[in-house]
Image (tube, rainbow, N blue to C red):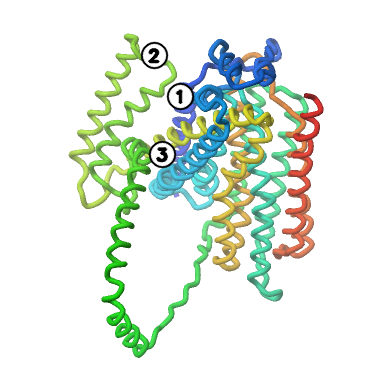
Amino acid sequence: MASGLSDKLKALVSTAFLLLLCFFLTTHVRSPSPSFNIPTLNAPPKTDGCSISLLKLNGHHSKCLHLKTHIPCVPQGYVNYLFIFYCICGRYSAIGYALGALWLLVLFYLLGDTASHYFCSSVESLSRELRLSPAIAGVTLLSLGNGSADVLASIVSFRSGSGEVGLNSVLGGAFFVSCVVVSVVNLCAARSGSAPTAACIDRSCFVRDVCFFLAVLSSLLAILVVGWINIWGALAFTSLYFVYVSMVSTTQNDTAVVPTIDSKEVDEPTSNIKESSSKERQQGDSSSRFSKFKEMASCYIGWFAYLIHMPLYLPRRLTIPDMSAERWCRPYAVASATFAPLLVATLYRSVSVGTEEGLTIYLCAGLVGLAFGLAALFTTNEAGPPKKALLPWLAGGFLMSVLWTYIIAEELVRLLVSLGFILGVSPAIVAVTVLAWGNSMGDLIANVAMARSGGKSGAQVAISGCYAGPIFNTLAGLGMSLVMSAWAVHPARFVIPVGPALFETLGFMIGGLLWALLILLKKDVKLDRALGIGLLAIYLCFMSLGLSRSLFLDHGQD
């Protein structure tokens, strides 16, 4: 009994320590753009109308001249998107739009690929190494793995002065998952099963998740109505997630059923095999030239794709320790242990290149990286990842994947803000649509696949994930963002950037949750098409209202 409590205590302490390290890293990453003043009640933000003055200029030449002579009011990333669009592309705006769209796809790919290949792999291995129970692992590390993009995008938005983008991206993603994804899961489950064997979910888990999500949204609505928050209020809001973890750990049965996907094997008669083999011999001579040409073409295409993918793959592979058995490579492991401290030193906020302090930090990081690299060289082999002392490797992979996800999310937010500025669309609309949809596509694909091929237990897992994930993103993403913003202005109060779109999103989200609770309890928690159609109608009404307000009201003000 005592040893069991000791193991649980060690697991909780280790998990808390890793999360605190993530918080420290993300709060000390150097921003690529100049810092923006965080609004407080004592010092309201000043609006100089620089964005309006730039939009009122005619012609790309005058806008380019304005950008060269004025500090941009739109936060720029590592790439100056406004300068590229107005100065480099100039009158060829179509090229600028095409480049922006392509770079947006690349950033979405990098964000998803980093989360799936590095972050989620480290999270799953860490949960096994720390011996976390399935319930605790699902609502802590695994939820962080699934919602890392939303959480870090929210933190980036608040740090860069675009808090409304962070609020709308998290709430928009949560609304999409809890409404559209739940709707599609219900429609797929209702279509795949007949009426007597309709998929049925657990009543207590469903009521617990939906009611707690309603309580979270009600608390957030009260905060937005007040319009400001201090450090203690932000900590209290974030601590609601620990309440949810406690509820799950006390009510969830750890002996969960893992859904399996049924597969059918097709046996071919031996006579058909013999006939097909004789036909292949007859046609082999006539198609040999075409086969050689096809092999050469595929080889060249493969090398071309490899050369394009290498600049996107190599920097992450050389700095993120990857302990998965199928991707294990000793040279990459040694290189990641060596270069990871240098990347952290490069991105550290207080490091100034060319100063004595910066040179000292780089030298210390290089020595630490050299020590880590030598240790990795003498403690690993080519056969596979190390069996002993695996926790430091997994912790390093976890932290470095968080850092890379944060960097990519930061650049993605800056690009979306710049595109919204160029298109004349509010960044909040871009966040609640493009950013929310992009970050939620993985949830849609995974949960729908689980509901269709995982049987009744698959539908249970899919529905539970549709509510547990948004709860984590709302409390962890917005909660940590509010904590960091309130801490930056403490003891003053942090003014929350509130717009009418936020109240619309919250209202429709609460309506969708109440509709789901009413219909499923009425149908004895059996998945039904009425729930799916109703949720889709709610989301379409929300999108119609938001787009009409953006198109007509904003143009009316102009």
Foreground residue, 299 or 227? 299
At numbered mark 3, what does the secondary structure look like: helix, strand or loop? helix
In the picture, measured across the screen, residue 131 lies left or right of residue 505, that is left
Q: Tell me the residue that label 2 is attached to.
A: 352
Lower position in the chain sequence, tag 3 or tag 2: 2
Residue 340: image location, x then y, percent:
33, 31
What number is the disc on residue 468?
none
Asked whether the viewer can see residue 467, the reply is: yes
Lower position in the chain sequence, tag 1 or tag 2: 1
| Label 3 crowd (10 A; few <14 / some 14-19 / many >=20) | many
The residues tagged by marks 3 and 2 sit, at their Cα atoms, a distance apart of 26 Å
Residue 449: image location, x then y, percent:
55, 61
What number is the disc on residue 398?
3
Q: Amino acid at mark 1?
A: Val
On screen, 326 above or below 143? below
Q: Tell me the residue that label 1 is attached to.
A: 29
Residue at 30% across, 67% down: 291
Residue 2: image location, x then y, percent:
43, 46
| Label 2 crowd (10 A; few <14 / some 14-19 / many >=20) | some
The residues tagged by marks 1 and 2 sit, at their Cα atoms, a distance apart of 13 Å
| Residue mark closest to the camera, 3 vs 2 | 2
Residue at 35% across, 36% down: 315
Residue at 24% across, 44% down: 330
In the picture, measured across the screen, residue 410 lies left or right of residue 331, that is right
Q: Amino acid at mark 3?
A: Phe
Q: Dividing the image into 4 quarters, which one contains the C terminus? A: top right
Foreground residue, 149 or 242? 149
On screen, 112 above or below 424? below
The residues tagged by marks 3 and 1 sit, at their Cα atoms, a distance apart of 16 Å
Asked whether the viewer can see residue 2, the reply is: no
Residue at 65% across, 31% down: 423
